[in-house]
Image (cartoon, helix red, strand yellow):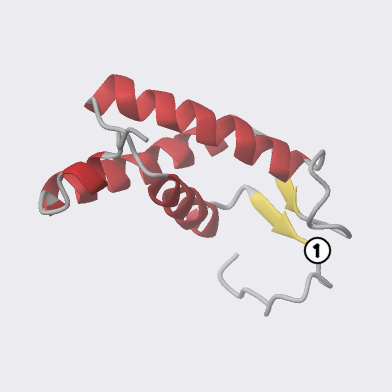
């Protein structure tokens, strides 16, 4: 097994890791602007054909490519996932069903 993730290869380079993670979050926010409002999950959160789940798969792949091209940095799946969901939490593009089990957000 070949280790490629920069975080694993150079764990002490926290400045670079933080810069890449912040840029990934910005990258996702900019990509969300390209889409109309997207309903989060709905009745079945495991519906892999739901718009949110399709968007997640596509943007994760594109963000990994962007990171390698822009930064010459291979982000871990965890770094990509955390940046994506931080961006989802900050974005006004996502709508939740009222009965999705999550507490109400008053800042949306």
In the structure shown, which secondary structural element does the residue marked by tag 1 occupy? Answer: loop
Residue 69 in view of the camera: yes
Q: Residue furthest right?
A: 43
The answer to whether residue 97 is above or below residue 56 is below
> Which residue does the numbered mark 1 point to in the structure image?
97
Give the residue at x 60% y 30%.
58
The answer to whether residue 1 is left or right of residue 97 is left
Q: Nearer the viewer, residue 40 or 62?
A: 62
The picture quadrant where one finds residue 4 is: top left
Image mark count: 1
Give the residue at x 55% y 33%.
59
Q: Nearer the viewer, residue 92 or 9?
A: 9
The answer to whether residue 16 is left or right of residue 52 is left
Give the residue at x 79% y 43%.
48
x and y percentages locating residue 24 in the rendered image: 36, 40
The quadrant of the picture occupied by the N terminus is top left
Q: Nearer the viewer, residue 59 or 28?
A: 59
Q: Residue furthest bottom?
A: 103
The answer to whether residue 44 is left or right of residue 30 is right
x and y percentages locating residue 70 in the rendered image: 27, 23
Give the residue at x 42% y 50%.
83
The quadrant of the picture occupied by the C terminus is bottom right
Mark 1 residue crowding within 10 angstroms, few (<14) / some (14–19) / many (20+): few
Residue 33 in view of the camera: no
x and y percentages locating residue 25 in the rendered image: 39, 46
The answer to whether residue 99 is left or right of residue 31 is right
x and y percentages locating residue 63 in the rendered image: 44, 32
Q: Residue furthest front?
A: 1
Q: Residue furthest top?
A: 69
The answer to whether residue 89 is above or below residue 22 is below
């Amino acid at each position: 097994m070949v280790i490629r993730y920069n975080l694993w290869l150079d764990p002490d380079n926290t400045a670079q890791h933080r810069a890449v993670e912040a840029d990934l979050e910005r990258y996702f926010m900019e990509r969300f602007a390209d889409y109309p409002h997207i309903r989060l999950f709905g009745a079945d959160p495991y519906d892999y054909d739901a718009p949110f789940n399709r968007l997640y798969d596509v943007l994760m792949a594109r963000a990994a490519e962007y990171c390698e091209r822009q930064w010459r940095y291979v982000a871990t799946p965890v770094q990509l996932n955390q940046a994506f969901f931080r961006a989802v939490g900050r974005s006004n593009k996502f709508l939740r069903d009222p009965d999705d089990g999550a507490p109400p957000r008053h800042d949306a």
